[in-house]
Amino acid sequence: MKGFGNITEMMKQAQKQAQKMQKQMEEIQNDLKERVVDASSGGGMVTVQMNGKQEILSIKIDPEVVDPNDVQMLEDLIL
């Protein structure tokens, strides 16, 4: 059964490579979680801050756009 040693070695190398890639992915995900992105709409009237995991951290709405008679406009600015 000569030759199986080479296959076993290849399997070990593949497993090591997979573990290395998994660790790198975890590091990238942690790095993304720490990144913060700001986006605004309506000329800065609505500002949203999110992290790299697409979690909303904050929403700021300029009081000028809060009109109880025009909720639709505010909803449009947020979307």
Image (cartoon, helix red, strand yellow):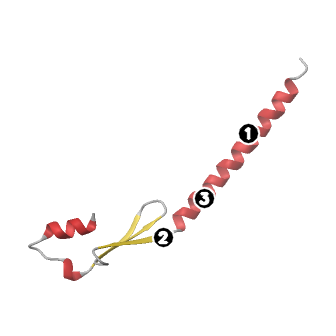
The amino acid beneath tag 3 is Ile
How far across and down, in percent of the image, does residue 14 sit? 75, 38
Q: In which quarter of the image is the C terminus?
A: bottom left
Q: In which quarter of the image is the N terminus?
A: top right
- Name of the residue lying farthest toward the top: 1
State the residue in front, 45 or 36: 45
Q: Where is residue 49 in the image (x, y as percent from the top left)?
A: 40, 71
Which label number is shown at residue 15? 1
Element under disc 2? strand
Q: Please identify the quarter of the rendering in which residue 8 is found.
A: top right
Q: Do the residues labelled 3 and 1 touch (CB within 8 Å)?
A: no
Residue designated by label 3:
28
Is disc 3 placed on a helix, strand or loop?
A: helix
Residue in the foreground of this view, choosing between 64 and 20: 64
The percent coordinates of residue 45 (x first, y second) are 28, 78
Q: Distance between the residues labelled 3 and 2?
A: 14 Å
In the rendered image, the vertical position of residue 11 relative to residue 45, given as above or below: above
**For this view, does 12 lie left or right of residue 45?**
right
Taking the spot 20% from the left edge, 82% from the top edge, the residue there is: 64
Q: Which residue is the extreme one toward the bottom?
A: 64
